[in-house]
Image (cartoon, rainbow, N blue to C red):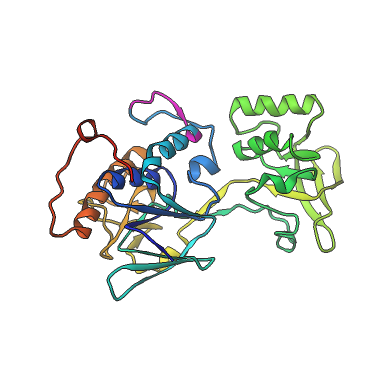
Amino acid sequence: MIETDILIIGAGPCGLFTVFEAGLVQLRCHLIDALPQAGGQLTEIYPKKPIYDIPGMPEVLAGDLVKQLMEQIAPFKPGFTLGERAETIEKMEDGRFKLITNRGTVHVAPVIAIAGGLGCFEPRKPPISNIFDFEDKGVEYIIKDPELYRDKQIVIAGGGDSALDWTIFLADVAKEVMLVHRRKGFRGAPDSVAKVMELADAGKIKLITEAEVIGLNGDDRLENVVIKHKRDGESLQKTDHFIPLFGLSPKLGPMANWGLNITKNAIEVNTFDYSTNVEGIFAIGDINTYPGKLKLILCGFHEATLMVQSAWKMLNPDRKLTLKYTTVQGVKGF
């Protein structure tokens, strides 16, 4: 059982910044995220996308922002439960919440901060009738351990940053990498596109555009895929793994059943401190809604700051919290 002061659901930028603000008032945090690494959308979907509205940073890549947030919270030693989805919440007799993930990990905390972005992310799956038969038998939607593909034949499908980045990375890991994309052009970062083209020209990867994977074949495991080319028709490609990287689809998931007031797939909050209708549960970032809501990382940072102040007062009802500037008190870790 994992116990902490504030249990944060969502390890995206708002969840990570909550750790910093909580650490300043000596509150410990533990984060849960269904994705296998911290960073949320910034890491999983567009790590090389430039962001321009972070104060003091004229431009920062999404992936770099996550790295800097992780450095910022390192002194406060947060805990992480990654690759697991927050499933159920119940109030215990002592007033704390018990949260259990889909893998049975138990967490206990008096305060819960939902910073789940747009909710739980589920991979967008290609419309292949028997794809479910090969899940975990050669078909993966998220790459958790690159070593799984060491010296294997791989077919990646997609045209965004994730597909491009993993094609580049796995070119030095796998025996053979083929990237299949239904268009001529790509939606990813220009430098990633250029690198993929260089690898293809050098014969280090196979690149097929204007084509789609439309079929999967195999007995106990995936053995080959059917590729339909716009001009050349259908062909078979032998492979050990098929990795469709078409992005993630956000859903509220189990939190829709937690007794929270929800409007249009967003959690209603009080803008005084971004508390929900359930005492002790807050919601910050893109997951919440209120009049005038702006879905910006900047706004999520502000919401996290005010939320932590109320959380501290809940946990310390007989004490007075005096705001001290970090320029005066510095950053004192645990």
Residue 6 visible in this rendered orientation of the protein = yes
**Where is residue 216 shown, x and y percent of the image?**
79, 55
**Where is residue 241 shown, x and y percent of the image?**
76, 50
Side of 197 where 123 appears, left or right? left
Give the residue displayed 27% in from the left and 64% down from the top: 277
Range drawn in magenta = 56-63
Residue 296 visible in this rendered orientation of the protein = no
When the figure is inspected, residue 254 is found, relative to residue 208, above or below; the finding is: below
Q: Check the picture and name the quadrant holding the N terminus.
A: bottom left
> Is residue 59 covered in magenta?
yes
Q: Nearer the viewer, residue 27 or 249?
A: 27
Give the residue displayed 53% in from the left and 36% down from the top: 47
Q: Nearer the viewer, residue 91 or 129?
A: 91
Q: Nearer the viewer, residue 283 or 78?
A: 78
The furthest residue to the front:
334
**Where is residue 245 shown, x and y percent of the image?**
64, 45
When the figure is inspected, residue 270 is found, relative to residue 330, above or below; the finding is: below
Q: Quadrant of residue 74?
A: top left
Give the residue displayed 80% in from the left and 59% down from the top: 221
The furthest residue to the bottom:
93
> Is residue 313 covered in magenta?
no
